[in-house]
Image (cartoon, rainbow, N blue to C red):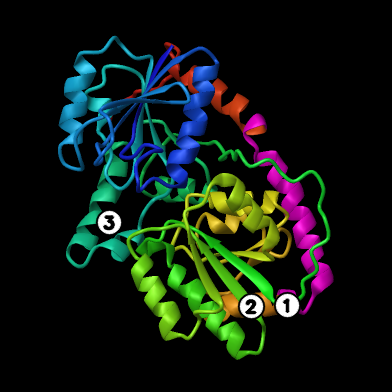
Amino acid sequence: MRFLMLNWRDPRNPLAGGAERVTLGYLSGLVRRGHEVFWYTHQFEGGPEEDSIEGVKIIRCGGVWSSRCLAQRWHRRQKPFDLVIDQHHGIPWFAPWWCRAPCIAYIHEVLGPIWDAFYLWPWNVIGRWQERWTHWLYRRVPFWTASKSTLDSLRRHGVQSITIIPYGVHTVAIPDLEAKPLAPPVRLIAVSRLAPNKRVDQAIRTTRILLDHKLDVRLKIVGTGIVEANLRQLASELNLDRSVTFTGPLAEGEKDRLLQESHFLLHTSQREGWGLNVIEANAMGTPAVVYPVKGLVESTLHDETGLVAESETPEALAAAIVKAVQAPERYQFYRLRAWQRAKTFHWDTVLPKACDWLEAQARPGSGSGAQP
């Protein structure tokens, strides 16, 4: 079979994140099953027009405004595809109206308030309206997502057919859960693109609050992004130069080592499709403390695999950490349950069912590609 993924970024794009990693996981799984897989994406500086990643053929052409027209032009020159996957990141590719093949939509999260993090009025309002209108336009196109919260949002926008396929992780759970006493300094870690919607500044403010309450903590921030300079300035203004460390992007092995050493992963995003790095931390025996937002309340089971703060504030996040520190035996329970659950999300478990479903969508008569 021939599959085509339409997505604004590919894994080698400097702005790529967890969405691109899991997308590659699914597509490379199809390649290993003997299928021919293409990924059409935006061009970026220094990126070759044609590339290959784990057997997936990458085509880079155009940008935010031009890529959709160029994708149609490229598509007309190709042999027919058995399935086209239109991945939504705020603005879709409108593939059901031009791809001439079965088509499904793939979405990680309904952006909603994230529009406010990147755009001022009136563009944020226009973005929200456009997103709701687009989902209604796609209402008869089969959707695929990873979390129930995204499913619920899509249903409110009128989408009729939605399948949940959980994210997989490449991270192999540590073979044994070695002792990790919850002793000072309490080691915190945030792993994220440093973008406005990730609100890493609130993890920094949480660190300041904990220190002010005489809890010895250290925070490591793994990743890079457009707000890194602002975050560094904030840490300096809060006199956290010795307590907050910016590591920049790390190789997977080094990232896993830091996750394993840490006591808690902090996640303060506005909204997530799931929270991939929560499961990666759990696989290393590290529970998460997260904000009560869509996606994160599913990847972290409150008071079982970690803690969900009572509100989206640094004060609430700090209170949850203090609560955990005061109950070290409960913390060890979180570690055990998180580690056990993370094993069920490895690609070896997730991928066979995901590929089966994608192949079924590509078969004639599957019902994919229905247009409004």
Q: Is residue 325 left or right of residue 346?
A: right
> Does dot 1 land on a helix, a strand or a loop?
loop
Q: Dot 1, crowdedness within 10 Å: few (<14), some or many (≥20)?
A: few
Disc 1 vs disc 2: Cβ atoms closer than 8 Å?
yes
> Does dot 2 land on a helix, a strand or a loop?
strand
Marks 1/3: CA–CA distance? 44 Å
State the residue in front, 118 or 136: 118
Q: Is residue 331 magenta?
A: yes
Q: Dot 3, crowdedness within 10 Å: few (<14), some or many (≥20)?
A: some
Secondary structure that dominates the magenta span: helix
Percent across and percent down for residue 146 are 52, 42
Which comes before the other along the chain, label 3 or label 2? 3
Q: Nearer the viewer, mark 3 or mark 2?
A: 2
Q: Residue at x 61, y 46 (%)?
A: 253
Q: Which residue is mark 2?
A: 217
Which comes before the other along the chain, label 1 or label 3? 3
Q: Quadrant of the N terminus?
A: top left
Q: Is residue 125 magenta?
A: no
Q: Is residue 236 left or right of residue 298?
A: left
Q: Which residues are magenta?
A: 324-348
Q: Residue at x 46, y 48 (%)?
A: 150
- The disc placed on residue 128 is 3
Is residue 182 in view from this perspective?
yes
Percent across and percent down for residue 311 are 53, 74
Q: Which residue is mark 1?
A: 184
Q: Nearer the viewer, mark 1 or mark 3?
A: 1
State the residue in front, 219 or 264: 219
Q: Dot 2, crowdedness within 10 Å: few (<14), some or many (≥20)?
A: some
Which comes before the other along the chain, label 1 or label 2? 1
Q: Is residue 66 left or right of residue 224?
A: left
